[in-house]
Structures are given as C-alpha cells and as structure tokens.
Amino acid sequence: MAGEKKLTIRDIARMAGVSRSTVSLALNNSPLVNAQTKARILRLIEEVSYRPNAMARGLVSKHCGVISVVVPPVSHVFSDSYFSESLSGILDAASEVDYRVAIETANEEFASGRRPERLFEERRTDGLLAVGALISDRYLERLFQAGRPVVLVNSELGETPATIADNEEGTVAVVHHLVSLGHRAIGYIKGPDITTTGLQRDKGFRNGLRLAGLPYREDLMACGDFSEKSGYEAMAQILERGPAPSAVFAANDMMAIGAARRLKEAGLVVGRDVALVGGDDAPLARYVEPPLTTLRQSMYDLGAQAARLLLEWVGNKRPPARRTVLHTELVIRASCGAARGARAVPGL
Amino acid sequence: MAGEKKLTIRDIARMAGVSRSTVSLALNNSPLVNAQTKARILRLIEEVSYRPNAMARGLVSKHCGVISVVVPPVSHVFSDSYFSESLSGILDAASEVDYRVAIETANEEFASGRRPERLFEERRTDGLLAVGALISDRYLERLFQAGRPVVLVNSELGETPATIADNEEGTVAVVHHLVSLGHRAIGYIKGPDITTTGLQRDKGFRNGLRLAGLPYREDLMACGDFSEKSGYEAMAQILERGPAPSAVFAANDMMAIGAARRLKEAGLVVGRDVALVGGDDAPLARYVEPPLTTLRQSMYDLGAQAARLLLEWVGNKRPPARRTVLHTELVIRASCGAARGARAVPGL
DNA sequence: TTGTAAGCGTTATCAA
DNA sequence: TTGATAACGCTTACAA
C-alpha cells in the first residue's frame, strides 16, 4: 500500500547530510556525537518515521531483545493461575525495558532435542525463564552451567538463580492457624515431591505439627499431583481409613477443591464439619462454596521479579544473586470455619 | 564454559571442503545440490552441532520466525480461559511449522504509539494475532489495509481475516433448549456491544425468542461487561423490577456465576427455581454449584485455526479467506434443571 | 553441480 | 566530532 520502500540508515544519513556512523551514534544516544547534530538527526528520523532493522542490529550486537518463558506442555496450562499470573508479571517487567516475551512449550522433545540450547545458539533468545520447573528438569541446570542466562520462577534447582516463595514458613502458619482453632487431627493431602512447592509445603506442614507438639499421622495423609481429581481421590483414601479429621490441609487449591467434593459426598459440610485450607490462592478459591482459605503466593510478583533478574543478567552479562525469596500470605476465608472465631474475608 | 567459539557457515564449508553457498543450499534443502554432498554436509553439521544464526538469516530472508499475539492489558488476562485456551491453540499451531510466539500487551499506548506497525517495521514479527479484539480496535483494520498479515481470533472487524464461532446460531439453540424445558419468561444478561461475541449472542438471543414466538422483554434484561461483578449487578436489577424469571441466559459464564450469587442471596436455588445458562464453557463452569450449562466455543480451536491462517499468509505472502467459522456447542449441566428432563452431564 | 561475489542493514574501529 | 571501511553470518544471482 504505502508506496515508499523501507528506509535504511543510509537514507537517513544522506537526508541528514552526515555519514551512516553518525546516524548510528545518534540512534544509540552516544555522547560522541554533537548534541545539535544528534537532535537534528533524531528529528528527521521521527519525521520520516525511520525504524532501524532489529535483525541487522542483533547481528552485530548479539542480542535479539527477546526472552523466552518455558511452560509445561499441558494444554490448559494458562488456565492455571500459577502460570497465567506469573506470565503477566513477566510481561510487565519485560515491557519496562522494551523487551519482548516469547512462549516455549516444554513438550517431550524439548529437553531431549536440546531445544533450549538451540534457542540460544541460533540467537533466538537472550534468556530463559522457567515457571514451576520440576526437580527432574535437569536441562535448566545444564544451561546455567553452560553460562546461559536462566532464572527459575518458583522452583529451586541447584545453583540456578531463582525467585521462590517462602512456602515452608507459610505452611507452618497454616498449621498454626488450624491448631489455634482447636484442631488436633489434621488431614493432609500432599503435593508431588518433584515440585519445589510440594516439597516446601511438606516440610512446612511437618514443622508446623512439630512446633505444635502434634504427631505426623500417616493415616491422615494421602498424596496428590496438584489436580482436582487427585485431591478427590486422596480425600477418599483418608476417609476410608477412619473417621474424618476435623481439618484438612491440601497442598494446593485444586486438590482442596477436589477434597471438598469428596467431603460433600460424605455428607460433611466444609467450614462447619471440616475446616479446609488450600494453597496458591487460585481465582477459583473465592468462587467455590464455601470460599477457600488458602496460602497465597503471588505468582505475579515471582514472575516479575524473576524477569527483572534475568534482564539484568542479560544486560550485565553477570548472573544475579542466586535466590530471591518472596513472602506468602495466609488468606482466611469461610472454608476454615468462620464460626470458630477466625477472621473471615468475603468471597469476593 | 564450552571453550569452542561459535561455528559459522564458513567453518562448515572449510571442514566439508566446499563453499559457503553449497552449505547454505544443503541447509535449505535445495535440489540444486548433489544428494551425496548434501548428506555429507548435513551429517557434519549434526556432528559438530552447527546452528545457523537466525538473525543473519532473517536479515536476508526478511522473516524473523516469530508471530505476535496481542492480548488486552488486564493483569489476569490469562486466567481467563478465553485467552489462555486460544493461546494454547496458537502455540501448538506455531510449533508445527517451527515458529515462535511472542506476547504483546495492548496497553494504552499500544495502538496510539503505533507499536504494532513498529513491530513490523523493525522486523520483529512476521504476523499478528489479536484475541478477542474490540470493535473499537481500529488499528487492526489499519494494519490489514497496510498489507500486514493480521488474523483476528473470535472477532470481526471489517474485511480483516478472522476465525469466529457461530455464537448466534448457538444462542438460538440455547433459547430453544430453555423454551423446550417449558420456560416462557427468560431473563437476559447482555454482554458488551463492543465485543463480537456479545453482539453475536445478542442477535442469537433475539432470534431465538422470535422463532419461539416469545416477546423480547426489556424488563427482564440488563447489561453486563462479562465480569462476575457485572453479572451480579445485572441480576440484582432484574430482580428489583419484578418476580424472578424462571430461566436466565447470561452472555458468558462469569456473568452467569455472578447472577447465581445474586439469585442465591434472593433465596432462589439455581437448577431448581431458576434455570441458568452461560457461555464460553470456562473451566469454572463445571466447578460451581450447580455445574453451569453453557454455550461452548472452543477457543483452542479458534486460536489454532487463526494461527494456521496467519502462518500460511506469512508463507504465501497472500491473505487467506476472509473468515473461518467454527461451531459452538450447548453443554448441558445441572444449572438448567436436570429434573425437567434435560440431559445432564456430570460436573467433572 | 559448485564456487565467487554482491548484498542484507547495522555497529565498531580507526583515521582524519 | 565525523566519516570511510570492515565486520556480523547468511542467502542468492551469476559464473564456471
């Protein structure tokens, strides 16, 4: 449509009556160019709306202005607030420094086919962010040790730089809260051992019991995989073994919601007969009936912070501090039994 | 770490004892190179794991291997299945042809600052996908008319190529279903007029009533903006005006959930006293109590299909057919009153 | 079928 | 302070 063909730095140089390098210097805001000349060139550039070619720039500078976010290959991965919120944080942090964000799905051949290293080798990305990596994702450590800029969002993997939430401390607080409400037999739906969050919350749960002088009861525990279904099944197992505990802690909200479904089937009313606590503060948590008490970790902040670390690294060529820890927060809602004096927060 | 410095096409040429252009031809699978030579070169490339520099390639080919997805600037945009599912579809379609996907947030200055045109001019993207664009997003038409590859996901904007769902027909089916259950007074929570989906469902609702020989009753209608809160408030308005209708259609699931909250406050039981239907089949729809009957549109498919169209366009340099229409599906769950003989689908 | 050479649009080096 | 000129790593006519 637009009859004009693409302008290059040559055209600008000619139009401004200077050389290409002068234009380049002006463009990159170098102090080596006369302020007046610079202003004149920049004005011209604005007028004719010239845009430097990013690929030509990148060819020389060795930077492409893109960071990549690796997410698990689940089809509805972004429906999970865990990922969607961290992505929002990442996008905001990247746009602050005019970087673009690309998404990579970690399908089966991703690690085995050395896709991440290819991304770097082909110069398609300047750095990698992995959200909710599993401890089996060794390729991330491999990348880090090869000197690639990599930051983990909410997981720990050896020395690889990461942002994490203090889920262990938070879970101690969860137990403390339940105990303070008078609960002594606390059911536990454990998260997967291959996730940092699962491990952290497990440690916290056990510590919490210890601090309260309560025993860790295997008969009240069952394992899940963070899915709703697994929470339902874990709850079923626990109920089969004996009388229902007066309180249940599930390592995340989806499992808590599954557990609630099973409890309801057993004729128990969550919030009255059984106190229930989950984790993550998923959007769903406030819509279920009753609204779910949960251990909130701000995935938005974890994502944004990780992106900032990564971008700094890319800029400085020097890895940042190994870990950044953000705080979790216990959000008390009706599922915990407001009647017993707990501070309740409305569902919406 | 790795002591070896980056290999270039020169190195490969030297090692293989051929010229650079031969390597290039082999790399691009050209028929102009001897099959044996090609095989030998490719084997060598594999052995030494040489990776062509994408930016150098792009500088010549004028393609960067990236398409961009524009999403609204809402912080939790990906928590909305509408966006997250379409993104999954887009990712899968892009990976089929080894393209990468970048995310762009359409914040205030996005359109006014001509960000999208910059992306193209700076050669940072090969094409644009807009998910759930508003009819006020005129910049998308502008881009299309300037010859830029743009495809809309689930919206219509002049001649711009798009994939859409047949929400109008689907909504006619919704009304038909409610009428067949015996409902005559159907409450209506209307979606925003600036969205294609809102308009489609509005047309469908009116058509459905007309086909059933029922009047469109202003007193049973209120407008929302697709948010849970707006659904709650719209329902409140309708209830203030008179006796509750026996059925309510809300133009999307979040508004339906808000409406359910208000109905519950009014002492009405959804699925028994009032039939409720939403739209989108959000993940939440099956978790609320009772599970929500909804008009499903597969955002995954809409996204994937749009991405395929876009990528074809980028490849061929020729715009695809103007529109692709995918079907919606009425998913019947308990909120519609299984007791009246409707086919019920379990909540999970 | 293969090699030579001329770009692609920048940045960076080094004189002037 | 500015201007030639040489990279950057690849593709593609064109020649051999």
Image (tube, coloured by chain):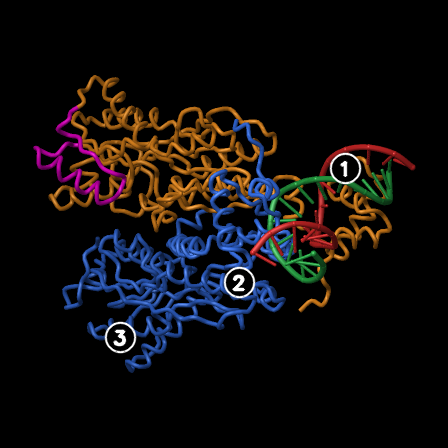
Chain colours: A orange, B blue, C red, D green
C-alpha gap between disc 3 and disc 2: 43 Å
Q: Could you tell me which chain the residue with mark 3 belongs to?
A: B
Per the image, label 3 sits on a secondary structure element best described as helix
Q: Nearer the viewer, mark 1 or mark 3?
A: 1
Q: Is B277 located above or below residue B213 in the figure?
A: above
Between discs 3 and 2, the one toward the N terminus: 3
**Image position of A120 (left or right of D3):** left
Residue A229 drawn in magenta: yes
Query: Label 1 amino acid?
Result: Ser
Query: In front here: A204 or B40?
Result: B40
Q: Is B186 located above or below residue A200 in the figure?
A: below
**Image position of A249 (left or right of B190):** left
Q: Which residues are magenta?
A: A217-246
Q: Residues within 10 Å of mark 3 (few under 14, many from 20)?
A: some
Mark 2 = which residue?
Answer: B315
C-alpha gap between disc 2 and disc 1: 39 Å
Per the image, label 1 sits on a secondary structure element best described as loop
Q: Residue at 57% across / 27% down in the picture?
A: A318
Query: In front here: A32 or A233?
Result: A32
Mark 1 = which residue?
Answer: A30
Query: In front here: B183 or B173?
Result: B173
Mark 3 = which residue?
Answer: B176
Q: Is A31 located above or below residue B163 in the figure?
A: above
